[in-house]
Image: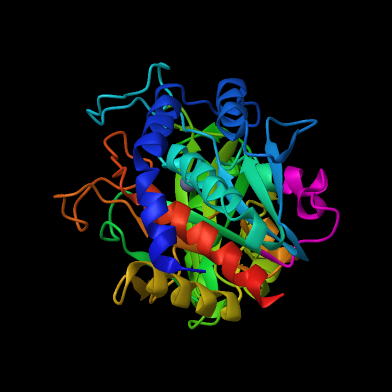
């Protein structure tokens, strides 16, 4: 791979990639069916000589690029869906879909992956193996990656891919054009805990004749925090935040039920495996101690996103070769958000990286972050994403 040529070509593609990104930004779609986005992706890939297929039960696009020489297959992924946010970014290409916005930058992921496809297609003859391009809907809570795996994306080239790579743009925190990653845990697992404390309603003046779920719910909220500090290794953090608590109608009526909803974040497969049983036990037994019952529903969200150490080392080398010294930074800590590329990295080694897209001139410390209605992403990051994705595929295939 000639890194200078690859980056120069990616930068030459910038006007075209930015135009595609702006088109997608105007027509954001939510969930697993993204008909307008899917059609735009198919149009962008047309003429590149790829083997293109679309999802059976979701609006995905899988494109396989066959190299001129034999070799293994690698996977590059870009997610495509938007969020239920009313855009307030002030961009000229603002959303035309009421209440829907590409607030997480997935429009840049699509355009960046199209850019990588163009760069790789231009090098088809020197490519020793195949590249699977995974255009994924439903990242924002819909488990789209898991469904694409069930539909065979990892074997789309006719054999299991040997490595998988993805990038995520961020509109603050990381300076423009800087790429970050870390070996091991890159992002958290995110689950939901729903507790319904069931008591017996009554008059507030005579609580001994009722069974008050409010005091028990309050005790459960605090007991969950005690469990976090007493039952889990402090060096392998667990975060439990009760975001919603609800009960009753008026000051002098003891209600029948109190509701607690919490988000649960873990950073290792071990903690993720053991936490449902422990939190359920705390809620049920605190309720039982007072003669009440707690119905607990524990819902699994996305698993922990774990990077392969050797693939992160490759990413550091590829980014530095492409962009120069100082453009790759090792993230000191995992990100406490969650990501469904985790399902891919459970199956094959790979790396998930963050690409700084803080708008030029904005302060990375204060610029609105992903998911904000004001979030803005710098178009120049598209060349970085395209070059890094293509560079990772080229480097891995050169290894044989
Ligand atoms: Zn995202």
Residue 160 x/y as whole percent: 81, 61
Give the camera-side residue of 324 and 350. Answer: 324
Using residue 5 as the reference point, say whether residue 257 is left or right of it. right
Residue 228: give x, y in percent of width and height: 52, 71
Q: In terms of image quadrants, where is residue 316? A: bottom left
Estimate the x, y position of residue 175 in percent, counting from the top left: 25, 60
- Residue depicted at x 68% and y 36%: 61
- The part of the chain drawn in magenta is 146-163
Residue at 78 percent of width and 30 percent of height: 57
Number of marks drawn? 0
Left-right relation of 329 to 386:
left
- Give the answer, above or below, for where 22 lies relative to 193: above
Q: Position of residue 218 (x, y in %)?
A: 47, 53
Residue lying at the far front of the rendered structure:
125
Please report the residue visible at 32 percent of the width from the left and 72 percent of the height from the top. Answer: 324
Q: Nearer the viewer, residue 272 or 171?
A: 171
Looking at the picture, tell me which residue is in the foreground, 235 or 293. Answer: 235
- Examine the image and state in which quarter residue 205 appears: top left
- Residue 159 sits inside the magenta stretch: yes
| Figure check: 270 above or below 7 | below
């Amino acid at each position: 791979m000639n890194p200078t040529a690859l980056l120069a070509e990616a930068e030459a593609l910038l006007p075209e990639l930015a135009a595609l990104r702006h088109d997608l930004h105007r027509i954001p779609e939510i969930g697993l069916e993204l008909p307008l986005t899917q059609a735009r992706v198919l149009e962008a890939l047309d003429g590149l000589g790829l083997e293109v297929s679309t999802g059976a039960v979701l609006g995905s696009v899988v494109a396989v690029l066959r190299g001129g020489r034999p070799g293994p297959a690698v996977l590059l992924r870009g997610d495509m869906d938007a969020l239920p946010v009313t855009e307030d970014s002030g961009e000229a290409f603002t959303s035309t879909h009421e209440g829907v916005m590409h607030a997480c930058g997935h429009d840049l992921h699509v355009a960046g992956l199209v850019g990588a496809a163009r760069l790789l297609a231009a090098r088809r003859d020197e490519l020793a193996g195949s590249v699977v391009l995974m255009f994924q809907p439903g990242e924002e809570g819909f488990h789209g990656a898991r469904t694409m795996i069930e539909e065979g994306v990892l074997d789309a080239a006719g054999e299991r891919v040997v490595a998988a790579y993805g990038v995520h743009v961020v509109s603050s925190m990381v300076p423009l054009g800087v790429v970050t990653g870390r070996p091991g845990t890159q992002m958290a697992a995110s689950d939901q805990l729903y507790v319904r404390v069931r008591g017996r309603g009554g008059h507030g003046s005579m609580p001994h004749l009722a069974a008050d779920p409010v005091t028990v719910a309050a005790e459960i909220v605090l007991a969950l925090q005690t469990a976090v500090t007493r039952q889990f290794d402090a060096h392998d953090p667990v975060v439990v935040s009760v975001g919603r608590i609800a009960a009753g109608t008026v000051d002098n009526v003891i209600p029948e039920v109190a509701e607690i909803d919490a988000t649960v974040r873990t950073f290792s497969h071990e903690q993720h495996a053991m936490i449902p049983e422990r939190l359920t036990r705390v809620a049920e037994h605190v309720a039982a101690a007072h003669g009440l019952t707690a119905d607990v529903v524990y819902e699994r969200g996305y698993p922990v996103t774990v990077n392969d150490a050797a693939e992160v080392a490759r990413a550091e080398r590829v980014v530095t070769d492409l962009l120069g010294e100082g453009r790759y930074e090792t993230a000191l800590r995992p990100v406490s958000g969650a990501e469904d590329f985790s399902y891919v990295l459970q199956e094959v080694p790979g790396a998930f990286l963050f690409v700084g897209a803080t708008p030029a001139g904005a302060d990375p410390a204060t610029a609105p972050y992903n998911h904000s209605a004001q979030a803005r992403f710098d178009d120049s990051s598209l060349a970085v994403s395209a070059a890094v994705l293509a560079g990772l595929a080229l480097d891995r295939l050169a290894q044989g």
